[in-house]
Each structure stands twice: as structure tokens, then as C-alpha cells.
């Protein structure tokens, strides 16, 4: 009886490790994909941000395409990049992701944040290529759209 228990426990341990190893690999890819996605936002926002600040010359074509790219990104369906069990609070993921568990526990609140950004970008895409003042006028709402979600659903960067 004791022996059987031991075997059952051993089998359970092996299969649990096996499945968590596969999940760990998948989850790493998923987290990398969504962080890369955020980098695409960041790159395009950087192009128009530097123009708004006067650090680079205003170029209506570059501004318009960066704004279109941002809108296209915001419209992507990325639900598969945010599986349950992939937050910073989940085992082993603390160092890998800054996604807070509230994304899932307060769902669908995060979608409201996403919608706010999309609306700001819909406007931004119509004004960014007009002139520098219009670009500047539309930027704040876009920045607020990013921040609105980060404040609630992204952990602050750890010091050091
Ligand atoms: C709906 C929520 C939401 C919106 C909107 C959003 N983000 Fe994020 N962002 C996150 C979350 C959550 C993370 C943490 C992801 C992780 O570490 O797994 C993140 C991470 C990032 C990162 C770090 C990526 C990395 O390499 O680790 C950058 C940069 C970023 N966001 C930029 C932006 C910009 C720019 C915008 C607006 C154009 C934006 N985000 C809009 C939720 C959002």
C-alpha cells in the first residue's frame, strides 16, 4: 500500500513537472511576443514624439504612417498573448513579466483601457499628417491611453 502510494506520487510529480516545463517554454514565448508588440508601439510613438518635442523635423509622411501603424497595432487581436496564468504573480514569472494579475482578476476592465487608446489613435491618425500643431494636439490623448493601462495593469520597474 505504502509502495503504491509512492509510485503514484512519483508519477504525479513527473507528469506535473513535464507539463509545467512545456508551459514554461510556451509562456516565455508568449511574454516575449507581447513585450515585442509593446516595443512596436513604443518605436512608432517615439517617431512622432521626437517631432512633437522639436528634436526631429516634422515630416508629415513619417508622422502619418507612424500614426497609422499605431492604430493598426491597437486594432490587432492579441488575446492569445495574454493567457491566464502568465502574470507577474504566477510561479516563476516574476522576473519575466510586468503584467499584473489584476489584468485577469478585474477583466474586462483592461479592454476599456484598450478601447480608450484605440479611440485616441483613431483621432491621431486623422491629424498627425496635417501639421505639427495638429500632431501635438493629438499626442496627449495617445500618451494618456498608454499610461492609463500601465498605471493599473503594469508593475513599476524595479529599482537597480
Ligand atoms: C491595455 C493595456 C495596455 C496598453 C493600452 C498599452 N500597454 Fe504597454 N504594456 C502593458 C502591459 C501589461 C505591459 C507588461 C507586459 C509584460 O511584461 O508581459 C506593457 C509593457 C510595455 C512596454 C515594455 C515592453 C518590454 O519590452 O518589456 C512598453 C515599452 C510599452 N508597454 C509601451 C506602450 C505604449 C507606447 C503604449 C501606447 C501606444 C502602450 N504600451 C499601451 C499594457 C498596455
Image: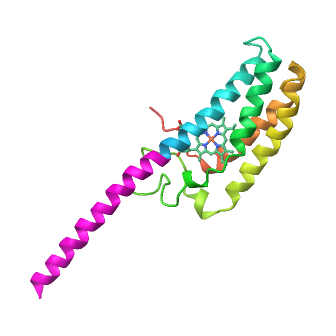
Identified at 13% across, 83% down, the residue is: 4
Quadrant housing residue 110: bottom right
* Picture coordinates of residue 81, whole percent (x, y): 55, 51
Identified at 20% across, 75% down, the residue is: 9
Can residue 92 be seen by looking at this rendering?
no
Quadrant housing residue 102: bottom right
81 in the magenta segment: no
Q: Choose between 40 and 120: the one closer to the eye.
A: 40
Identified at 74% across, 55% down, the residue is: 112
* Picture coordinates of residue 65, whole percent (x, y): 76, 26
* Picture coordinates of residue 7, whole percent (x, y): 15, 77
Can residue 160 be seen by looking at this rendering?
yes
Q: Is residue 148 above or below residue 143?
A: below
Q: Is residue 6 above or below residue 160?
A: below
Q: Give the magenta-colored segment's residue range.
A: 1-30
Q: Quadrant of ligand 1?
A: top right
* Picture coordinates of residue 92, whole percent (x, y): 38, 52
Quadrant location, the N terminus? bottom left
Q: Choose between 136 and 68: the one closer to the eye.
A: 68
Q: Is residue 160 above or below residue 105?
A: above
Amino acid at each position: 500500500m505504502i509502495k503504491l502510494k509512492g509510485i503514484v506520487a512519483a508519477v504525479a510529480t513527473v507528469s506535473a513537472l513535464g507539463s509545467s516545463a512545456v508551459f514554461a517554454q510556451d509562456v516565455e514565448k508568449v511574454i516575449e511576443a507581447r513585450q515585442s508588440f509593446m516595443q512596436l508601439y513604443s518605436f512608432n510613438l517615439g517617431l512622432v514624439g521626437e517631432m512633437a518635442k522639436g528634436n526631429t523635423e516634422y515630416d508629415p509622411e513619417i508622422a502619418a504612417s507612424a500614426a497609422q501603424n499605431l492604430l493598426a497595432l491597437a486594432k490587432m487581436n492579441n488575446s492569445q498573448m495574454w493567457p491566464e496564468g502568465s502574470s507577474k504573480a504566477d510561479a516563476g514569472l516574476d522576473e519575466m513579466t510586468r503584467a499584473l494579475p489584476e489584468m485577469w482578476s478585474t477583466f474586462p476592465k483592461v479592454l476599456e483601457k484598450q478601447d480608450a487608446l484605440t479611440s485616441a489613435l483613431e483621432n491621431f491618425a486623422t491629424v498627425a499628417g496635417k501639421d505639427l500643431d495638429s500632431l501635438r494636439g493629438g499626442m496627449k490623448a495617445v500618451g494618456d491611453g498608454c499610461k492609463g493601462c500601465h498605471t493599473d495593469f503594469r508593475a513599476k520597474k524595479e529599482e537597480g
